[in-house]
Image (cartoon, grey):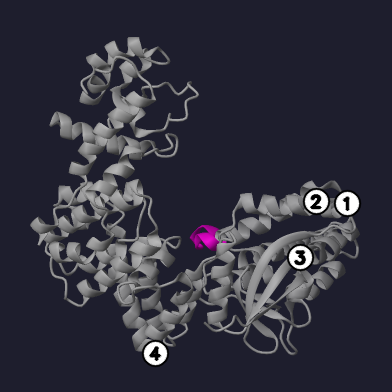
């Protein structure tokens, strides 16, 4: 893999916006989203800096790419920088008002100096200001007209939400200045606050990248360190940069909005990785930008790619939504999708994604059943390495897409090497331990599945009249409290009556239950580690039969 091509250095806000530097947000980058919670946090972060000369506040990283010697594409950091500018603009407006009402006869001069140093410039021969920051296609016209050139909007309610947020941020900071006794009454103090605190003590790590590929890799690296960025934005910018005609851009924007409505920006990266896993057995997140560029070298290719992933995004959404229209007439599929969502393992998604358009509804349902059993055995109970299973699923996904695997049975045979056999699954289930607070729904799913098999009835996990009972009470200090063998379904009323009482008395309550599992526990004369182990072993025998695939019957 090629080395990352970037430089990193620390910048104050004045250094980011000084020396003739102009920043522009890519036209199709996300719009302004900060709200009062973010504005309040920024304002509070500034207050200690007013009292301590040497103090600074770290604002995180910004990523930018040079477009020419003076213009830089702001790839990440627009929310923070825009908000800082809105604070400065609020101060500028307040200084002008101070001169008008006689509080500071130099207010307008101070405002002009701040505006020219940090916010805007006037080109020779021009009468209007140009901002040192250009926002995206939704926000920039509003920002330039109503904030940079100070023309109050005539009808704010008709503006997009992001533009309303920009105006609300400006008003928020204006009010904060008015509420601060010193800043409200002393123009010199307000100008000093902006010049020496906001412009110089807010420090960013500026990461200058040479190209979009380096930017994407930086995004992935920062994401791995816990910084919330959106690689989807960079991919979108690359795709949209291919379109020159307004009609093409508008069409692409509509397609993109439908894609994100299906999979959300948060899940776009895993969706795109799983999409490419239908073509390559191993795909890393840091490979995505290169793959997208390869897939869309021309405007026609970019448009075709967008159309294709829109279709796949709809299918991908169905894999996480049992109420999706794809399953409207298939209650068994809805049940299986619900289980997959509960398991939280998505390694098999590329295989399912490739199968949706290829298999009949009957075969697809059989494959979903295989996916549930495979995931339950391998991920939930076995807790085995996903690095082993994912390439196997991806190779099968490729064969399905290419028409070489045409049935659930053929797919089962293709992935059989990573299917935990009964003996291994039984041994893993015998010792299964699940953290009750975090895995309550999963525990309920397992217990009711076993209960249904024993009783021949179908129980509703979402019903409110039952709960999960700890046979050995939670108040006990035994180290096997979270073992599955210590847990049973029980009516809520019986659970309350049996809270923290001795097993001798609990046995009688368990015999009153409509559930079979409590009645089986009631047959033990006492309850200890050995009794729990024996009971969990009995549960494991049922589990083997419930979450099993008969590969021969599938072929």
Q: Position of residue 163 (x, y in %)?
A: 56, 63
Q: Residue at x 30, y 62 (%)?
A: 349
Q: Residue at x 52, y 82 (%)?
A: 1
Task: Mark 2 and mark 1 in contact? Answer it, CB < 8 Å.
Answer: yes
Q: Where in the figure is residue 108, as x and y percent of width and height?
A: 84, 67
Q: Which residue is mark 3?
A: 203
Left/right placement of residue 79 relative to residue 508 reads: right
Secondary structure found at label 2: helix
The residue range painted magenta reads 156-163
Are dots 4 and 2 in contact, CB under 8 Å? no
Q: Please say whether residue 208 is visible from this viewpoint.
A: yes
When the figure is inspected, residue 115 is found, relative to residue 182, above or below; the finding is below
Quadrant of residue 87 within the rendered picture: bottom right
Q: Which residue is mark 4?
A: 298
Majority SS type along the magenta span:
helix
Q: CA distance from mark 2 to mark 3?
A: 15 Å
For this view, does 471 lie left or right of residue 553? right
For the residue carrying disc 3, how many other residues have a C-alpha within 10 Å: few (<14), some (14-19), or many (20+)? many
Label 4 neighbour load within 10 Å: few <14, some 14-19, many 20+: some
On screen, residue 526 above or below 141: above
């Amino acid at each position: 893999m090629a080395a990352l091509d970037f430089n990193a250095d620390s910048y104050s806000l004045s250094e980011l916006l000084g020396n003739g530097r102009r920043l522009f947000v890519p036209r199709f980058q996300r719009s302004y989203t900060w709200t009062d919670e973010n504005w309040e946090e920024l304002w509070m972060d500034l207050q200690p800096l007013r009292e301590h000369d040497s103090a600074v506040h770290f604002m995180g990283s910004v990523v930018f790419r040079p477009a020419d010697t003076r213009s830089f594409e702001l790839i990440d950091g627009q929310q923070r920088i825009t908000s800082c500018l809105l604070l400065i603009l609020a101060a500028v407006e307040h200084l002008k008002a101070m001169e008008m009402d006689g509080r500071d006869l130099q207010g307008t001069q101070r405002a002009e100096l701040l505006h020219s140093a940090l916010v805007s410039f006037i080109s020779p021969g021009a009468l209007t200001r140009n901002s040192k920051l250009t926002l995206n296609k939704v926000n920039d016209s509003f920002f330039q007209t109503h904030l940079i050139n100070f023309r109050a909007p005539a009808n704010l309610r008709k503006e997009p939400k992001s533009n309303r947020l920009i105006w609300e941020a400006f008003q928020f900071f204006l009010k904060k200045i008015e509420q601060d006794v010193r800043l409200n009454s002393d123009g010199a103090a307000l100008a000093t606050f902006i010049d020496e605190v906001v412009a110089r003590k807010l420090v960013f790590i500026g990461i200058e990248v040479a190209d979009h590929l380096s930017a994407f890799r930086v995004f992935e690296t920062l994401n791995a360190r816990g910084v919330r960025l959106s690689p989807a934005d960079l991919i979108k910018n690359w795709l949209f940069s291919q379109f020159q005609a307004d009609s093409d851009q508008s069409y692409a924007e509509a397609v993109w909005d439908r894609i994100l409505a299906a999979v959300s920006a948060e899940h776009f990266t895993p969706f795109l990785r799983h999409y490419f896993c239908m073509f390559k057995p191993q795909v890393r997140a840091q490979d995505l930008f290169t793959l997208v560029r390869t897939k869309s070298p021309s405007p026609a290719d970019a448009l075709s790619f967008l159309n294709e992933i829109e279709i796949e995004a709809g299918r991908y959404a169905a894999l996480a939504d049992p109420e999706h229209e794809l399953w409207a007439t298939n209650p068994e599929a809805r049940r299986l999708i619900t289980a997959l969502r509960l398991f939280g393992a998505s390694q098999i998604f590329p295989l399912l994604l490739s199968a949706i358009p290829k298999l009949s509804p009957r075969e697809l349902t059989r494959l979903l059943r295989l996916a549930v059993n495979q995931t339950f055995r391998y991920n939930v109970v076995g807790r085995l390495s996903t690095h082993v299973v994912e390439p196997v699923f991806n190779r099968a996904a490729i064969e399905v897409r290419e028409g070489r695997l045409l049935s659930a049975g053929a797919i089962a045979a293709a992935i059989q090497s990573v299917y935990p056999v009964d003996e291994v699954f039984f041994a893993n289930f015998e010792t299964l331990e699940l953290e009750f607070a975090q895995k309550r729904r999963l525990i309920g799913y397992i217990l009711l599945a076993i209960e249904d098999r024993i009783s021949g009835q179908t129980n509703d996990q979402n019903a409110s009249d039952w709960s999960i009972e700890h046979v050995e009470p939670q108040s006990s200090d035994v180290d096997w409290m979270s073992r599955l063998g210590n847990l049973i379904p029980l009516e809520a009323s019986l659970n309350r009556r049996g809270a923290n009482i001795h097993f001798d008395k609990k046995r009688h309550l368990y015999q009153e239950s409509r559930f079979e599992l409590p009645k089986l526990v009631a047959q033990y004369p006492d309850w200890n580690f050995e009794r729990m182990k024996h009971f969990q072993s009995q549960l494991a025998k049922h589990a083997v039969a419930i979450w099993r695939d008969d590969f021969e019957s599938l072929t």
